[in-house]
Image: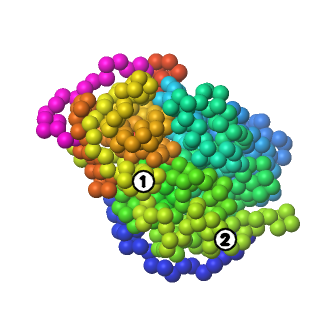
Amino acid sequence: MTVDTTPINNTPINPTVTAVTERIAERSRDTRTAYLERIRAAASQGPARGKLGCTNLAHGFAAVEPVGKDLLRRSFKPNIAIVSSYNDMLSAHKPFESYPRRIKEAVIDGGGIAQFAGGVPAMCDGVTQGRAGMELSLFSRDVIAMSAAIALSHDMFDGALMLGVCDKIVPGLVIGALSFGHLPTIFVPAGPMTSGLPNTEKARVRQLYAEGKVGREALLEAEAQSYHGEGTCTFFGTANSNQLLMEVMGLHLPGASFVNPGTPLRDALTEAAAKRVVKLTAGGDEFTPIGEVVDERAVVNGVVALLATGGSTNHTMHLVAMAAAAGIDLRWDDFSALSDVVPLLSRIYPNGSADVNHFHAAGGMPYLIGELLDAGLLHADVKTVAGGGLEARYRSEPTLEEGTLTWREGPRDSLDKQVLRSAGDPFSPDGGLRMLTGNLGKSVIKVSAVKAEHRVVKAPAVVFDDQDDFLTAFKAGELEKDFIAVIRFQGPQANGMPELHKLTPTLGVLQDRGFAVALVTDGRMSGASGKIPAAIHVTPEAAAGGPIARVRDGDVVELDAEAGTITVLAEDFDQRLPAELADSTTFGTGRELFAALRGAVGTADRGASVFGAAL
């Protein structure tokens, strides 16, 4: 891999970033030490393939072509596992169809051999939004982690390439890969689809539909023009937040995140990742296991980049769960403390009108990482799959010169200050992701898309146990007033914590009509959280008897995103018995198969994981 390098930045690290990193390291000391001891012991044993019995090994290479079979039986060359989320129904995963062949050829060119180790399930929250299938979405992350572990469990591999993009897929693949933390692993993205219908127009049509001013055909046409081809959706939801995190945490090649599918540069980056992982194996020159890459500094870098871009609120859970898989204890307090000092440097829909293609064209990841490094907000001295640290590698951008992939110095100025700005001229001085506490428990709120005048709402509660009941009340004209919608029994123990994204257009209509409205829920809103103040991931959840189960219609609730509080103003609130869900439908669309996970899942602030807070 050839990159232009620049001197290591001597900017002192921000004291809050230092303090938070040290705090995480201190509380993680025992679990991180135990994790590193495990993966280093596994690495010290050498390639596990060499210790397989003859029958085991013969099974492992039985279907391989003769040349590869000979290489595997003699353990001459490193064997790279390919783990993929490919399916051809979903736009983000369709590009992976051709990756295995391309990767295998590139790995051979790089001096290794590769096998397709296994697939992982990939569902789309866009398809299941508002449907029963959404109740499987969060749990799919941990199913993916287990599926990745099964793929790697054969002891045939010296390294891995993880092919995944969207919502729960990348966090699940990271957790699974970290359970084999002694293996070098590179994440290989597919990139975003090209830009379609402008986001402002899409949002306008959605709101018109919510008001009953246009019909289903007009709405469907707008959506089809927005989501129109291969690649991830172009708004800054969880899928594109995933790509941002993988790059800034050093698990992507520099500049790989937002290159469109089906382009020569995309193909060249995929081939480069395949060749690069061979060099990272124990038999190569730069042994770099994933468990050593994902340390406390890399995790903090991920949080900082998420805050600086107004990324997905889902990562207040996913990053916690990914960190735990590496023995690192990340908490919501850490997000909140970092948010106070990390400026908002980008506006990508729904925090602005631009999409990720515009962000990429304005300077993208090289510019963003450079600005955060220069501001002392990122740890530069981290391990990455590209070698060196962030300063030496990740300020560079990939390009093709006469068909050959190379890296050049990335832009030092934003090409569109409506989309991407410097740390000295941010959109706002803080990251816009805050923690709320009060007698309702804890929750998170993303205010990067919420105007200042809407960040404090004090109004009577209107309580619902199902999002469809809320929408029915809206259509009946019962919500033409100031109120705070409390949508409860939407947490992981209750029904798998579905996203409630389809409430956003309706609440937006009411806000535009001049009403003071907000949402409080133990469910999720995702990276699609919009202009409505939404206190989400409330924990403890209603199904666990949390305070949100004691809220009644008419209770005055105060949501203050500026002060970081959420309070029910009722004198007898603490003495009430929690409500119980009258009708819990947990059958159909496969939901009955996930009963054990609902019973085992942890709280939202600990990652909503079935694996426990620290693996």
Give x and y (percent) for residue 605.
36, 46
Q: Look at mark 2 in the image and give the residue it sits on.
A: 410
Q: Look at mark 1 in the image and give the residue it sits on.
A: 451
Q: Magenta segment, which residues?
A: 568-586
User: Cβ–Cβ below 8 Å for labels 1 and 2?
Assistant: no
What's the mark number on residue 586?
A: none
In this rendering, the answer to whether 521 lies above or below 322 is: above
User: Along the line of sight, which residue is nearer the eye, 409 or 222?
Assistant: 222
Label 1, secondary structure: give it: loop
Quick check: is 584 in the magenta stretch? yes
What residue lies at 79% left-to-right and 52% top-to-bottom? 263
Pointer 1 local density, CA inside 10 Å: few below 14, some 14–19, many at least 20: few
User: Along the line of sight, which residue is nearer the eye, 532 or 312?
Assistant: 532
User: Along the line of sight, which residue is nearer the eye, 399 or 5?
Assistant: 399
What residue lies at 65% left-to-right and 37% top-to-bottom? 222
1 vs 2, front mark = 1
Quick check: is 292 in the magenta stretch? no
Give x and y (percent) for residue 208.
55, 35
**The N terminus: image quadrant:** bottom right
Give x and y (percent) for residue 359.
62, 59
User: Along the line of sight, which residue is nearer the eye, 209 or 329?
Assistant: 209
Pointer 2 local density, CA inside 10 Å: few below 14, some 14–19, many at least 20: many
Q: CA distance from mark 1 to mark 2?
A: 33 Å
Q: Could you tell me what secondary structure mostly forms the magenta stretch? A: loop
